[in-house]
Amino acid sequence: MGIKIKVEFLGGLDVISSGVREHKCILPLEEGDATLKDVIQFITKNVITDPKDIPVFICDETVRPGILVLINDTDWELEGGEDYVVESGDVFTFTSTLHGG
Amino acid sequence: MGIKIKVEFLGGLDVISSGVREHKCILPLEEGDATLKDVIQFITKNVITDPKDIPVFICDETVRPGILVLINDTDWELEGGEDYVVESGDVFTFTSTLHGG
Amino acid sequence: ESDRDDLLTLEEYKRYGRQMIVPAFGSLGGQMSLKRSKVLVVGAGGLGCPALLYLTAAGVGHIGIIDNDRVDTSNLHRQVLHSQETLGMFKCESAKLNLQKLNPFVDIKSYPFSLSNDNAFDIFEKYDVILDCTDTPATRYLINDVSVLTGRPLVSGAGLKSDGQLTILNLKENWPCYRCLYPNPPDPGSITSCSEGGVIGPAIGLVGISMALETIKIITGFYNNAYSKPFMLVYSGYPLQQYRLFKMRSRQPNCSVCGSNPNITKEDIRNNIIDYGLFCGKLDTNVL
Amino acid sequence: ESDRDDLLTLEEYKRYGRQMIVPAFGSLGGQMSLKRSKVLVVGAGGLGCPALLYLTAAGVGHIGIIDNDRVDTSNLHRQVLHSQETLGMFKCESAKLNLQKLNPFVDIKSYPFSLSNDNAFDIFEKYDVILDCTDTPATRYLINDVSVLTGRPLVSGAGLKSDGQLTILNLKENWPCYRCLYPNPPDPGSITSCSEGGVIGPAIGLVGISMALETIKIITGFYNNAYSKPFMLVYSGYPLQQYRLFKMRSRQPNCSVCGSNPNITKEDIRNNIIDYGLFCGKLDTNVL
Ligand SMILES: [Zn+2]
Ligand SMILES: [Zn+2]
């Protein structure tokens, strides 16, 4: 079966997926078993176009500092972070922090 | 049972509901039986605070010209207009047209 | 100053370099398209000021500004292109004066009179894209009809209190016009003007800036290739700022100006057979 | 010009009347709060220009502008408060010159030097609300820490290419600071500046205008009563403009400046024991 999710890249982070901002994905796990950690793994393997870009997204085995992670429009800090249990229909948004002014 | 819907007023139209923009409502009809016409009826009876304001919303038994109607973020013209069959979870947005510049 | 539309001077490269390197903008081709383009802004008020600032800064080659109103103190909390020094001046001329200081490479023409049935066609035909920054329904219908009949895309903005709306009309074959969305004019009693209802500067300013970006997208050809279905952006300033995107109807076959059997013609407008004041109930808020 | 902070002149009534009648603004009380308020804008670039234009127009009583950069041609496609006439001038002084023409009722002070460990406290203490319109991580952390340690709410904006971000930090007891959101600085190699990555004028302009509205909301007390949970607005200019609202974390107990056991103090900052350049990897894009 798998879990239907949406992955979005904002703030220019779509560079890691050939400029595609929205990705509808099927996470190949059962509902209840999968956490955000699995989503991050899935992204590095299936969504990032060029493996050379993985370090843009990942650092020390988690999402790189400076990238905000939102689960259904809410900061992942409020949702349990990497241990958040994925539900069908979830939207995961990753946005790089901008510094320009 | 009834059908759970959300009604929103934008563009200043919240004046007809004491400044409240979002209304979670239960339409007292069965799914499949209710159309947008019923939602409009329901609003005039249950959401508009003061019956004197009904003419701000209704004209010739339909929504007044100049008010845009959106069903789940889509123009009602694309969804069958008043005959749209209401589904649980639908969001109906009404926005008055602004002319200021 | 370069008066050739087919090249950029070194000075222009320096000036526009930072936007030319943004991929969506379209590089040198995007800049040349802007330089060659002719944009008419109707209304130099709360929407027109920020739209004009950013279109001029970006390097639109030719800008026309039409407005018969004069700068008043009560405008200055939101009409940031005017100033204490231009009080009493025609807004279009005040705007031109300040814009020319921001970017002398832009050719700016001011029209210090009302847009009317008599002059609209002659003026619109000189421009490629029209911005509706006005605030009376009668003028909005006139601008729409002339845009349709001259085949010009129309970027239409509006704002009141802390709310705003933005749509692109008449962009392509299947896009709606203002009459497709609003076949019947609103009841004059239901119209609130900025002087009656008030307006928060940054709220209307945000819509004006958004209009500038949509105009840039049109001119640089972004909508030729990318996603392009009719839409409307609806902004609310309170309680939290939001900009909602709604999917809108296409061109309506029964539309009286852009439909299959239109009954509004250039001749009828020019001969004043179409009376916009009468159509909209003679409301004249006269506040741009 | 009125130099009393406890009344409005007739001229000021005329000037601000249209915004005072918008209910959310808070009427005369809202206007008096603006008049009494002191706002510091750090950076008079792509964000600072529109923020300053609309804050000045709205009648903030006292505005400070700090920026050590000078106006360059390459700024003018987006920094619409400067002009051909102020090329080479300090941005804060160019801004002051033009803002004073827009609204002579506002008291504007310019600080033509860099914000630093040495001067930040003295300057911040003179103001009620701080706007971060800068563009280097080191400065953003300095502004944050001094805002926290002086108890000032911080309206923080950022933009690049056609994207933007806006958040309010340190607004109330439970609101986060910049370090709560970003405890670790970004890798210097991952930072893109406006000169490298480019920037579209209206995109960053829109964020700057939004910052002005959030500042007005803070000053007029809107967040005292209404919905007030930490949020971040994320703007995209392409393909269609959107402004997404995200719900953000509250103040973090382990935050090194606003947490329960903070290890960053005023003394350490003033004595340069906290080295922001070192902390952020000595990147200096130097582009406001
Ligand atoms: Zn039409
Ligand atoms: Zn903190």
Image: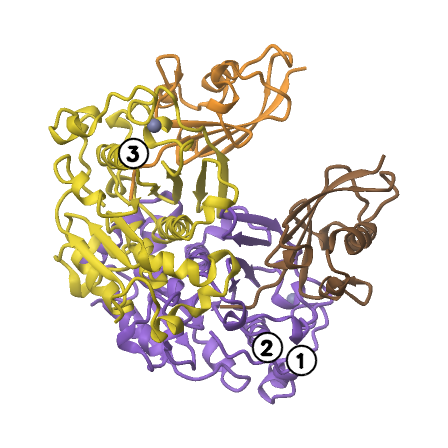
Chain colours: A orange, B brown, C purple, D yellow
Along the line of sight, the residue nearer the viewer: C81 or A61: C81
| Mark 1, secondary structure of its residue | helix
Residue D97 location, x and y as percent?
Answer: 19, 64
Residue C202 location, x and y as percent?
Answer: 41, 57
Dot 1 falls on which chain?
C
Residue D57 location, x and y as percent?
Answer: 34, 63
Q: Quote the CA–CA distance across marks 1 and 2.
A: 7 Å
Q: Which residue is mark 1?
A: C279
| Mark 2, secondary structure of its residue | helix
Asked if residue A6 can be seen in this view, the reply is: yes
**Residue type beneath disc 1:** Phe
Along the line of sight, the residue nearer the viewer: C74 or C143: C74
From this view, report whether residue C243 is shown above or below residue D247.
below
Q: Which residue is mark 2?
A: C138
**Residue type beneath disc 2:** Ala
- The image shows a total of numbered marks equal to 3
Residue C71 location, x and y as percent?
Answer: 36, 77
Q: Quote the CA–CA distance across marks 3 and 1.
A: 58 Å
Q: Which residue is mark 3?
A: D148
Ranked by sequence position, the earlier of labels 1 and 2 is 2
| Residue located farthest toward the top when viewing the structure as drawn | A33
**Residue type beneath disc 3:** Val
